[in-house]
Image (cartoon, rainbow, N blue to C red):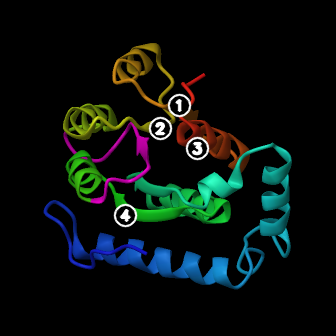
Amino acid sequence: MVKNAVAAPGETFMTRRIFRVIDVFLTFVASNGCERGSPRGAGAGRRSLSRLRRTGLDLSRMERARVLLVEDDILIAWTISSVLKQLGCTVVDYADNADQAVERAIAERPDVILMDIGLAGARDGIAAAEEIRASTGQSVIYLTGHADVATLRRAAQTGPLSFVFKPFDEATLGAALDRALAGEPAS
């Protein structure tokens, strides 16, 4: 669950409230069976989870993972949160801009940071990742729809754990998390 119910500087109270509602909804869905409320129909959550188990991922390691999700598109954040909950991860907090990401990464000290490159505001996810790395020594998994060479080179200079390109599926995100939690280098 998201701990802070008060809006941080630079965010609206409504944004914080929306993330809180999403978190409560996803917790309810996870506790009442993943297939309920699934847009893909009954049993979709079970099918996704069984497909993930067949990939050889260490789901027990992911069940202990604390994740900071940095994404400025609320629908994508909701989708990622849903996948993370299916994997058993705990989303410790959300951020939708670089300043929030740095503040929350320092405060929460998550196991993994999922960082969108294109964020709202003056600074992007790469700038946030640089500051987080300088402050805490922690690297990120980049989520990106920006596949241009210049952006990827700039991001690669921050020493990311991995890149996950949008659109992605549960197995791709799960594999990136599994490698990051195992301490394996990005491939």
Q: Label 1 crowding class (10 Å Cα cut-off): few <14, some 14-19, many 20+?
A: many
Task: Specify which label sits upstream in the sequence, 2 or 1.
Answer: 2
**Contact, CB < 8 Å: mark 2 with mark 3?**
yes
Image quadrant of residue 26?
A: bottom right
Task: Specify which label sits upstream in the sequence, 2 or 4.
Answer: 4
Q: Which mark is residue 163?
A: 1
Q: Label 3 crowding class (10 Å Cα cut-off): few <14, some 14-19, many 20+?
A: many
Q: Quadrant of the C terminus?
A: top right
Task: Specify which label sits upstream in the sequence, 1 or 4.
Answer: 4
CA gap, disc 2 and disc 3: 8 Å
Say whether residue 118 is magenta.
Answer: yes
Image quadrant of residue 118?
A: top left
Question: Residue 42, position in %: x, y?
Answer: 84, 76
Mark 4 sits on what residue? 93
Between label 1 and label 3, give the one nearer the viewer.
Answer: 3
Task: Specify which label sits upstream in the sequence, 2 or 3.
Answer: 2
Callout 4: SS: strand
Mark 3 sits on what residue? 177
CA gap, disc 2 and disc 1: 6 Å
Q: Label 2 crowding class (10 Å Cα cut-off): few <14, some 14-19, many 20+?
A: many
Compared to residue 118, the image places residue 31 above or below, namely: below
CA gap, disc 1 and disc 4: 20 Å
**Contact, CB < 8 Å: mark 3 with mark 4?**
no
Mark 2 sits on what residue? 141
**Contact, CB < 8 Å: mark 1 with mark 3?**
no
Task: Specify which label sits upstream in the sequence, 1 or 3.
Answer: 1
Compared to residue 157, the image places residue 173 above or below, namely: below
CA gap, disc 2 and disc 4: 16 Å
**Contact, CB < 8 Å: mark 2 with mark 1?**
yes
* Point 40% across, 55% down: residue: 68
Part of the protein shown in magenta: 108-122
Amino acid found under the numbered disc labelled 3: Leu
